[in-house]
Amino acid sequence: MTSTEEPSEGKHLRDALERFGQESGLFRKLDVKRLGKHLTDPFQIQVSVAGPPVNLTDVGYGVSQALPVVVQSVLRSKRSIYLLQQPEVHLHPRAQAALGTFFADLASRGDLTFVVETHSDHLVDRVRHEVAQGRITAEQVIILFFDKPKLETEVTPIELDDQGNVVDAPSSYRRFFLEEELKLFAGGTAECA
C-alpha cells in the first residue's frame, strides 16, 4: 500500500512513530516484514537505525518498551486518561526527553491526559521546556513530588510558571542532585543546608 492509499489513522500513526524515532534517536524508520501471505501469519517489526533494517529484538530494549506507549497514545480515544509507570525505563536521556515532548504534544490538544510516574529529570525538564516554549500551558502540568523524610511519605504538588520554572518546591526537591554538584565543586565534602 502506498502512502497515498494508507488510511488517515495509519498515516497519522506512522508519522508520529517516525517523528518520535528521529527526535529520540531510537530509530529512523519502522517497517513490518510479513513472514507469510495471510494477515494472521507471523511478522517482524524491522527497525532502521543507521544501517540496514534489523529485527526489533536485535536493537536496544528501550525501543520495544517505548513503541507500545507511543502507539497506544496515538491511537487513543478522545478524553482518555493514560496512567504510565516509568515509561522512561531502558531509554537513554535523549529518548527520555523526547517522551516529554511527545506527551506534551498530545496533551496540548486537550483531549488526552497523562499521569506519568517517573524518576527521569530528562522527561520532566523537557515538559518544563515545552511550557517555556508555549507548546503547552503551565496550567496543564502538575508535578507531584513524593518525599519520605521520616516514616510516612509526603506528597507535595509543584506548579510551573509560564517560563517552565518550578514554583514553591519544597527544600528537599532535587536536594540530592544539588549536593552531588556541590561535592564536585568542593572536592567531595559539601552538603546542602
Image (tube, rainbow, N blue to C red):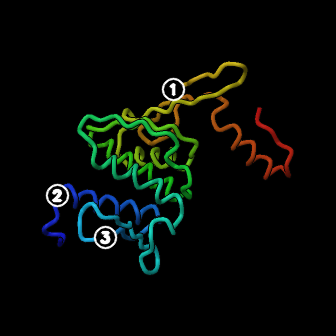
Residue at the spot of label 3:
34
Alpha carbon distance from label 2 to label 1: 39 Å
Front-most of residues 155 and 78: 78
Q: Are marks 2 and 1 in contact (CB under 8 Å)?
A: no
Q: Secondary structure at mark 2?
A: helix
Q: Secondary structure at mark 3?
A: strand
Which amino acid type corresponds to the residue marked 3 in the rendered image? Arg
Where's residue 95, x and y in %? 49, 57
Query: Residue at point 14% right, 69% down?
Result: 4
- State the SS at label 1: strand
Q: List x then y, in percent, for residue 79.
A: 26, 34
Q: Identify the residue at image location x=71%, y=19%.
A: 151
- Report if the CB atoms under discs 3 and 1 are less than 8 Å apart: no
Q: Is residue 68 above or below residue 178?
A: below
Mark 2 crowd level (few <14, some 14–19, many ≥20, 10 Å Cα): few
Q: Determine the residue located farthest toward the top in the rendered image.
A: 152
Could you tell which of marks 3 and 1 lies nearer the N-terminus?
3
Q: Quadrant of the N terminus?
A: bottom left
Three-letter code for the amino acid on which mark 2 is drawn:
Ser
In the rendered image, the vertical position of residue 113 relative to residue 68, given as above or below? above
Residue 174 is drawn in which quadrant?
A: top right
Instruction: Give whichever of 97, 62 is nearer the camera.
Output: 62
Q: Could you say where residue 28 lies in the image, as x and y percent from the top left?
A: 40, 70
For residue 8, the mark is: 2
Q: Is residue 11 left or right of residue 169?
A: left
Q: Position of residue 72 (x, y in %)?
A: 33, 47
N-terminal of the pair, mark 2 or mark 1, is: 2
- Which tag is nearer the camera, tag 3 or tag 1? 3
| Mark carried by residue 157 | 1
Left or right: residue 32 compared with residue 2: right
